[in-house]
Amino acid sequence: MGSMKSQRGAVSIFIVMFTALLVTIVTASFVQIMLRNQQQASNNDLSQSAYDSALAGVEDAKRALVALKACDKDPSPQCSNLRAALTNNGQNCEVLADPSVGVTTFTGGESQVGRTDMNQAYTCVKVQVITDSYEGTLDKGQSIVIPLETVDDPNLIAALRVSWFTQDNIPDVDSAGNPISQVPQFPTQPQLPAEADWSVRSPSIMRSQLIQFPDGNLTLDSFDTPNTNNAKTLFLYPAIFGAANLDFASDGRQSPASRNYPAVSRCDSAFSFNGGYACSTDVAVPSLGSGTRKAYLQLTSLYNKSTYRVQILGGSGNVLNFDNVQPIVDSTGRASDLFRRIRARVALSEGMPTTYPEAALHVGKSLCKDFFITNSSADYSGDTDSVACAADQ
């Protein structure tokens, strides 16, 4: 009997010890998970704060760039000093503290932002005013107007290199959640199907509109003159067999007997152009004649979303640099002992409208035109064309 009691006591002690060990392990694991989550949350907060600090550096750089843009209209010795500081000394981390820039001050190698108790600052902001390209992403149907302003004589502009559609523009899955191949598709014929029939793997058609005129001599009539070089439009159509070189002068819409066909452009399936673009075409810019050229390019992405790059080319195919059109700002922010670095392209559209008309007239259905000649003013007040138009629908 005594032996059986001893065995029962040993089992009870073993159960108690095992239970205590299990509870200890569970408690320690729970505490470890809690501390890890707390550390992760703290790191996330610091990371966001450091990112915000870097953004503050970008915003301060914008202030200097906007001031430089205003100098183009009202040059002064101060403007010359500002341009020299940003152009020649822009890769200095403390360029914003330059007396000619005067945006901020650096203390101990950094500029404090926010409240002092937050321990936030940006430690380095570099500004690149002169860039060799203009880059961005357009949603389906979205447009952008790019000023063709260079550090060189604008009359030296000979062509524009338009590259578009990257692998990131192809969605990973379709609307049903099925994986999508990342190899682009290209239409076999330059047709314009319904939007629903255009594959999400096909590069967009890029509507490229050139607007140019002698600086200080802009007249609206000049854009309506037959065979003028002031306004040209090409629809860059993606194709494997497309042309590497096109010409805005081939736009013959103002010629009475012409038909406007898409301009079949060079593409491939390996995204090999300019470091990752599926399509790339050089489009020649026609001469404007006398006067200093003022030019703009409007791009519209049709059918699909598209990432793009535009470069200005000289007569020998050399790249002409943009001048304070889309500067690059490299900013490093700090929060406590955590750092974040961002690189942003800043499009400066000071003095330009924020939205651009996509067309002079846009309708969802068919368009009815009913013309008549009359000597009676009363005919203009009635809805005389509604019946005729209704019959055409």
Image (cartoon, rainbow, N blue to C red):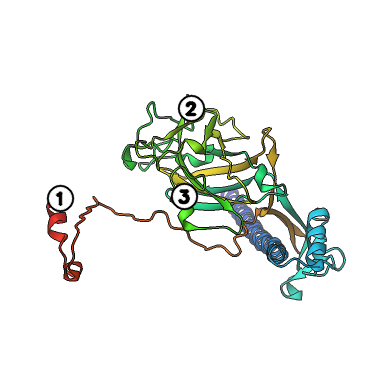
Alpha-carbon distance for marks 3 and 2?
Answer: 24 Å
Q: Nearer the viewer, mark 3 or mark 1?
A: 1
Q: Which residue is mark 3?
A: 139
Which mark, by number, is residue 75? none
Q: Nearer the viewer, residue 56 or 263?
A: 263
Q: Which residue is mark 2?
A: 242
Q: Quadrant of residue 174?
A: top left
Element at label 3: loop
Crowd tier of the residue under label 1, counting other residues whose Cα lies within 10 Å: few below 14, some 14–19, many 20 or above: few
Q: Specify the farthest residue to the top.
A: 241
Residue under label 1 = 392
Q: Is residue 305 left or right of residue 45?
A: left
Q: Compare marks 1 and 2 and give the one earlier in the sequence.
A: 2
Quarter holding residue 198: top left
Q: Secondary structure at mark 2?
A: loop
Spatial separation of the CA atoms under disc 3 and disc 1: 34 Å
- Amino acid identity at mark 1: Asp
Image point (63%, 51%), residue name: 291
Where 30 falls versus 231 (above or below)? below
Residue 391 point in image, percent of width and height: 12, 52
Tag 3 and tag 2, C-beta contact below 8 Å: no
Check disc 2 and give the amino acid type. Gly
Q: CA distance from mark 1 to mark 2?
A: 39 Å
Q: Is residue 194 left or right of residue 215?
A: left
